[in-house]
Amino acid sequence: MAQINFKGNPIDTTGQFPTVGQAAPDFKLVKADLSEVSLSDLAGKQVVFNIFPSIDTAVCALQLKTFSQKAAGRDDVVMLYASMDLPFALNRFCAAEGVDNAVTGSDFRHRSLAEHYGVQMNSGPLAGLYARATLVLDANHQVVYSELVSDVVNEPDYDAAMAALAD
């Protein structure tokens, strides 16, 4: 269990967030077309894995857009975004914002990130949703960058995450 903050107030999360050097745990998410994606589907690709509370909040929207812009032209990298939002909301956002290099995944069906990634917030006004986090995985899906953002209302460190990618 990790302790993070929401607007400076402490909240707890479930489980343990992956750290650098660990193998990323598997997951199963529902994509915008209602098919499923798991980590094994991304074999051989580097992954920038962003987890956030809800696409319908300003910081979450900014996080998705900023990482997508920074990864433009990187065909060797999968930009994966996940939350508890329904696939329809994630798809609507990407279509409205012109984000076409993102794989969005909803964990509404399996809750695999709560179980394996330790990101579910257990207290505070967003209890039940996921904390803000970024992982960068190498092509073997080892964690090379890990950030569980200390306060949910803050943005992740975009530059540090992108710097962790292999060229």
Image: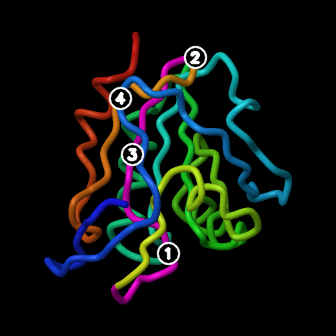
Earlier residue among tags 2 and 3: 3
Query: Mark 4 to mark 3: distance in Å?
Result: 12 Å
- Residue where numbered disc 4 is placed: 20
Instruction: State which region is magenta.
Output: 124-139
Residue found 47% across the figure and 56% down from its top: 118
Q: Which percent across, then down, holds residue 93? A: 57, 67
* Mark 4 Cα shell of 10 Å, populated few (<14), some (14-19), many (≥20): some
- Say which amino acid is labelled 1: Leu
- Say which amino acid is labelled 3: Thr
Q: Is residue 35 magenta?
A: no
Decide which of 107, 156 is in the foreground and name it: 107
Earlier residue among tags 1 and 2: 1
Q: Is residue 100 above or below residue 110?
A: above
- Residue where numbered disc 1 is placed: 129
Query: Mark 1 to mark 4: distance in Å?
Result: 24 Å
Mark 1–mark 2 CB contact (< 8 Å): no
Q: Which percent across, then down, holds residue 20? A: 35, 29
Residue found 33% across the figure and 72% down from its top: 12
Q: Which percent across, then down, holds residue 119? A: 45, 60
- Residue where numbered disc 2 is placed: 140
Query: Mark 2 to mark 4: distance in Å?
Result: 13 Å
**Total label count?**
4
The N terminus lies in quadrant: bottom left
Decide which of 130, 32 is in the foreground and name it: 130
Horizontally, residue 113 falls left or right of residue 155, namely right
Q: Is residue 128 above or below residue 53?
A: below
- Residue where numbered disc 3 is placed: 134
- Say which amino acid is labelled 2: Asn
